[in-house]
């Protein structure tokens, strides 16, 4: 019995088996399950970064209109910016997990519609493999978890709707879906250009193809004119000068296209932009599958691509066209943008592999599942530094920022269910590269529905200790509660202590530090209390209180192990007592945290100098 393949399989009409009874359709829908399992524990849906721009515009600024950026300073995307946040903005703030669940449903719906398109032409397993391609990727978790990524989810979903309607030759509804896709993201231009040339069950009259082509081009032209006019009127432009840079360097298009295509391919295989330990076996595995399919076509003349070749070409053009449109974001790679690109690559690869042998399609699905399983899990804590895998934003970085937003909002709301107008909230010791996640003051505005509130940086409070701030939000790297509130009065006394230290007023310093301790009722503010104890440990030796200094230094490090002051205090105590090995261990701890710290380097040199000048002990 001959083995089934895309060429040989008879087209299966949807009427022959309703979708709800088709096991392969259910397999496609189940493609979202790995996304959920590999995202467990993450604060899915919590607004972050540019979400606050759109929420601020939709919920606080009034005068709703579709004819501006909707909070964006770069794009006109009225469906994914204005309509989305008008509709779901309040829900995203009150029940963010529900928004993530809705995104999950829409992802499954888009894949299911794509399956229905392909099932009219392909066997069920092949159609399911290609339709689930945009789901089984590490970066697709971002589309589920982040409201701002509805731009990519929306263009995928409505492009799938347009393809579905085109497969059933319904021009009017296909054009409506195409317009909605364009209103989500400009990548839908690729959908528009390829929609009329979707491979069909039988050759269609050339007149029909051209009628579809003219209709889609007319729609794109109207949208394009409106897009350019609105961008010009509101001076919308890509950030960081990306547009002007691209216009001034047209010769750079080829390497930029290679950059976009290669990184898209890596993201589709759940690989990060920077090389990882599993890259080589996964890439070799993918190469073997494609090479095997091509070789099969050469040695088995009776199993030529035939009709599958049209799908391979059509999907390949989609992949190349969608990747080419990512040139504009060079060099700021974000892997979730590859989801739309993956639609074409999935169709092309499955058509090619399925025409050779169905086993190759199964092997491709297995390879992508393994690669997806090997992708990093969501971070369980707010790390001091972002994971660096070569992307400006990926799922790990997103979850880190969402945890910061979730904990900050909850901690503030627990103590301050409301804030007085014009209140100021100070930020202290934020983790690296997170300040932009608050959207300037917009996070406070949106959380409390008050546009008079302000964030204040800690250096501003240092410059003006008398500034009226309601509370101080402090980040703690290694504590169970990573966001705590510090009393402004306690912080002011700590700042007084620092002034007294600079005057070498040890007694005044200790008095101010004792006051800071007493004014901070929340003992969970470990970073703050560690700093207080560390400064105290530096002053006590000057008053001859060596034992208490050691006690305070150890307390400081127990509260926060990265506190330099505790290490410095212990190092100088041990140095003065001739315990050079212990002193050098403390200096090494300082330099492990800050390799170029001048004081740490000077301290280590003092210890080594003391070691060189120490008399030799008899053996």
Image: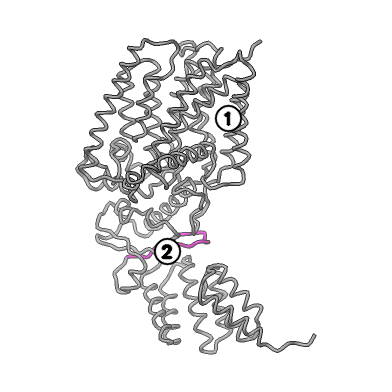
Magenta-drawn stretch, dominant element (helix, strand or loop): loop
| Residue 434 shown left or right of residue 374 in the figure | left
| Residue 293 shown left or right of residue 170 in the figure | right
Sequence-first tag of 2 and 1: 1
**Quarter of image, res 221:** top left
Q: Is residue 147 visible?
A: no
Helix, strand or loop at mark 1: helix
Q: Which span is picked out in magenta? A: 470-482
Residue found 23% across the figure and 33% down from its top: 225
What residue is shown with label 1? 365
Residue found 61% across the figure and 20% down from its top: 298
- Using a 10 Å C-alpha cutoff, classify the residue at mark 2 as few (fewer than 14 neighbours), some (14 to 19) or many (20 or more): many
Q: Nearer the viewer, residue 286 or 438?
A: 286
Q: Nearer the viewer, residue 609 or 35?
A: 609
The correct choice, above or below, for 300 with respect to 66 in the image is: above
Residue found 47% across the figure and 52% down from its top: 400
- Give the number of the disc on residue 592: none
Residue 359: x and y, percent?
63, 23
Q: Nearer the viewer, residue 616 or 533?
A: 616
- Quadrant where the N terminus sits is top right
Residue found 63% across the figure and 21% down from its top: 296
Residue 539: x and y, percent?
49, 83
Residue 185: x and y, percent?
34, 35
Q: What residue occupies the far right of the structure in this picture?
A: 619
The correct choice, above or below, for 604 with respect to 72 in the image is: below
Q: Is residue 410 visible?
A: yes
Helix, strand or loop at mark 2: strand
Is there CB contact under 8 Å for labels 2 and 1? no
| Residue 388 shown left or right of residue 69 in the figure | right
The correct choice, above or below, for 75 with respect to 358 in the image is: below
What residue is shown with label 2? 474
Q: Nearer the viewer, residue 251 or 230?
A: 251
């Amino acid at each position: 019995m001959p083995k089934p393949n895309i060429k040989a399989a008879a087209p299966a009409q949807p009427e022959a088996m309703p979708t709800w009874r088709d096991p392969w359709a259910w397999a496609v829908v189940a493609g979202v399950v790995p996304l959920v399992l590999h995202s467990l524990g993450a604060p899915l849906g919590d607004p972050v970064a540019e979400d606050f721009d759109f929420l601020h515009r939709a919920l606080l600024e009034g005068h709703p209109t579709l004819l501006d950026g909707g909070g964006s300073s770069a794009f006109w995307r009225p469906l994914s910016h204005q309509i989305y946040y008008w509709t779901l903005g309040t829900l995203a703030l009150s029940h963010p997990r529900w928004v993530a669940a809705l995104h999950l449903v829409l992802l499954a719906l888009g894949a299911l519609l794509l399956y229905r398109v392909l099932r009219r032409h392909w066997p069920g397993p092949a159609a399911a493999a290609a339709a689930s391609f945009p789901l089984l990727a590490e970066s697709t978790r971002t589309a589920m978890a982040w409201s701002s990524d509805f731009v990519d989810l929306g263009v995928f979903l409505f492009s799938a709707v347009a393809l579905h309607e085109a497969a059933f030759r319904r021009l009017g509804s296909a054009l409506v879906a195409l317009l909605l896709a364009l209103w989500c993201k400009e990548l839908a231009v690729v959908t528009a250009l390829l929609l009329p040339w979707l491979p069909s069950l039988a050759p269609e009259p050339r007149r029909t193809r051209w009628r579809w082509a003219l209709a889609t081009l007319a729609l794109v032209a109207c949208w394009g004119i409106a897009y350019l006019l609105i961008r010009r009127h509101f001076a919308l432009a890509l950030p960081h000068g990306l547009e002007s840079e691209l216009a001034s360097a047209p010769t750079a298009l080829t390497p930029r296209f290679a950059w976009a295509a290669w990184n898209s391919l890596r993201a589709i295989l759940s690989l990060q932009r920077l090389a990882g330990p599993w890259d080589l076996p996964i890439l070799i595995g993918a190469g073997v599958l494609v090479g095997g399919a091509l070789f099969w076509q050469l040695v088995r003349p009776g199993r030529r691509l035939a009709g599958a070749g049209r799908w391979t070409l059509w999907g390949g053009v989609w992949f190349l066209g969608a990747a080419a449109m990512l040139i504009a974001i060079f060099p700021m790679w974000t892997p979730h943008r590859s989801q739309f690109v993956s639609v074409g690559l999935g169709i092309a690869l499955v058509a090619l592999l399925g025409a050779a042998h169905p086993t190759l399609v199964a092997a491709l699905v297995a390879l992508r599942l393994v690669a997806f399983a090997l992708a990093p899990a969501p971070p369980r804590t707010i790390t001091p530094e972002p994971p660096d895998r070569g992307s400006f934003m990926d799922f790990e970085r997103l979850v880190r920022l969402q945890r910061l937003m979730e904990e900050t909002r909850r901690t503030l709301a627990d103590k301050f269910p409301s804030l007085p107008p014009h209140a100021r909230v100070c930020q202290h010791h934020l983790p690296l590269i997170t300040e932009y996640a608050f959207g300037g003051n917009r996070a406070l505005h949106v959380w409390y529905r008050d546009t008079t509130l302000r964030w204040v940086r800690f250096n501003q409070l240092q410059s003006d200790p008398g500034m009226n701030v309601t509370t101080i939000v402090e980040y703690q790297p290694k504590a169970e509660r990573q966001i705590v509130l510090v009393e402004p009065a306690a912080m002011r006394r700590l700042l007084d202590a620092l002034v007294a230290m600079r005057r070498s007023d040890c007694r005044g310093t200790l008095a101010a530090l004792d006051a800071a301790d007493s004014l901070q009722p929340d003992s969970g503010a470990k970073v703050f209390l560690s700093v207080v104890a560390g400064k105290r440990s530096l002053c006590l030796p000057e008053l001859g209180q060596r034992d208490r200094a050691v006690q305070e230094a150890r307390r400081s490090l127990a509260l926060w192990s990265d506190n330099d002051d505790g290490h410095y205090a212990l190092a100088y105590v041990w140095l003065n007592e001739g315990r050079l090995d212990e002193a050098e261990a403390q200096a090494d701890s300082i330099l492990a945290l800050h390799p170029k710290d001048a004081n740490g380097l000077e301290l280590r040199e003092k210890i080594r100098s003391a070691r060189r000048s120490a008399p030799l002990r008899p053996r």
